[in-house]
Image: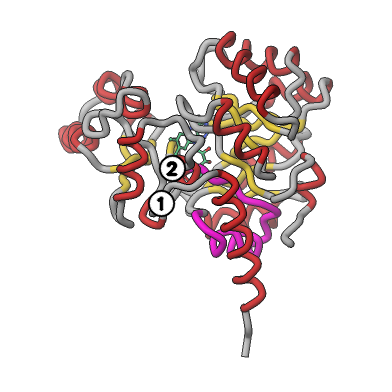
Amino acid sequence: MIKSVFCEMVGIKYPIIQGGMAWIADSSLASAVSNAGGLGIIAAANAPVEYIREEIRKTKKLTNKPFGVNIMLLSENAEEVAKMVCEEGVKVVTTGAGNPGKYIEMWKAHGIKVIPVIASVALAKRMERSGVDAVIAEGCESGGHVGEITTMAIVPQVVDAVSIPVIAAGGVGDGRGIAAALMLGAVGVQVGTRFLVAEECTVHDNYKAKIIKAKDIDSVVTGRPTGHPVRVLRNKLTRKFQILEKEGAGAEKFEALGVGALPKAVKDGDVDNGSVMAGQIAGLVCKTQSCQEIIKEMFSQAEETLNTVKVV
Ligand SMILES: Cc1cc2nc3c(=O)[nH]c(=O)nc-3n(C[C@H](O)[C@H](O)[C@H](O)COP(=O)(O)O)c2cc1C
């Protein structure tokens, strides 16, 4: 059985975090992942603070296992959410898109394990100095906001640079990905794209179908001129973004085109004109399963993979 220091740190069976996913990772997905032995995460994204509070309370009713909240630092209400998680007794916070430095003291005072997502060695080191418990090193294969470095390259460099535990994210879709992440020195993985098609994931069925249909080359990165590029599956919307890029349009035009695009795909199921965030590993994701099946299958394949490695 694959165990690591990360399991002890947050009190879980399998060293896997379900990535926070804006508009998608709610109490249904988070509680199912936690009940299956991973660490379920509720994504706060730009949602109103009272909605997130309610999702936390629902999750507590659906599972007695540990779970966490992902806070998007770019969000206007990040500070409010940062305080609310302390009031609600949340045990783990992951953060996306930035440096959570100013909240760390408050979270630590409330006994919260703090695990930021980072996409560079420099930020990992800064986070370690600020007293975080672990970091999630995310490669640009991942769905959603991306940095510039691949998982294969960033994970070992971060592992060498810090002495806190490192979780690998980006492109992990099955047990071989877990085995590879462990070989690179990570003590666990964070997975987004594969959980998008979980039975308990409340994303629109059209979104799930598009992930299942996707091939290896079907994701693209859009919005580079905004400074916040995102990886999504190709569709009419990404073609419009590509035209803007060719025209050399300014950031405001990109932002205008992106307004409301994620909920359009997630809630309305408009996967042609909405933003279908997903990682490069979507090409490997081929069926809907429960979170329990996904996690069990991934870890038994990881064990099998690690056991069959032979160097002759
Ligand atoms: C639809 C979608 C939405 C995401 N939203 C967030 C978010 O709100 N906050 C965050 O930190 N990461 C976000 N991510 C990144 C995931 O948490 C996770 O790190 C990533 O999906 C891992 O790579 P993978 O997609 O290859 O599994 C998102 C990813 C996807 C696919």
Question: Does residue 36 appear left or right of residue 203 in this picture?
Answer: right
Residue at 48% x, 47% y: name it.
289
Q: Residue furthest bottom?
A: 312
- Is residue 186 found inside the magenta-colored segment of the image? yes
* Label disc, if present, on residue 56 of the rendered structure: none
Q: Quadrant of the C terminus?
A: bottom right
**Amino acid type shown at disc 2:** Val
Q: Residue drawn at (56%, 38%), measured in percent from left and top?
A: 19
Say if residue 104 shows up in the picture.
yes
Q: Residues within 10 Å of mark 2 (few under 14, many from 20)?
A: many
Which residue is denoted by mark 1 in the rendering? 287
Quarter of the image where one finds residue 262 = top left
- Asked whether the beta carbons under mark 2 and mark 1 sit within 8 Å of each other, the answer is yes
Could you tell me the amino acid type at mark 1?
Lys
* x and y percentages locating residue 68 in the rendered image: 67, 30
Read off the magenta span: 173-192
| Residue on which disc 2 sits | 197
Q: Residue at x 69, y 32 (%)?
A: 67
Q: Quadrant of residue 309?
A: bottom right
Q: Nearer the viewer, residue 116 or 262?
A: 262
Q: Is mark 1 within 8 Å of ligand 1?
A: no
SS at circle 2:
loop
**Is 16 placed left or right of 112 in the picture?**
left
Q: Is residue 161 above or below residue 103?
A: below
Question: Which percent across, then down, holds residue 18?
Answer: 58, 40
Q: As displayed, is residue 307 above or below residue 58?
A: below
Distance from the alpha carbon under mark 2 to that under mark 1 = 7 Å
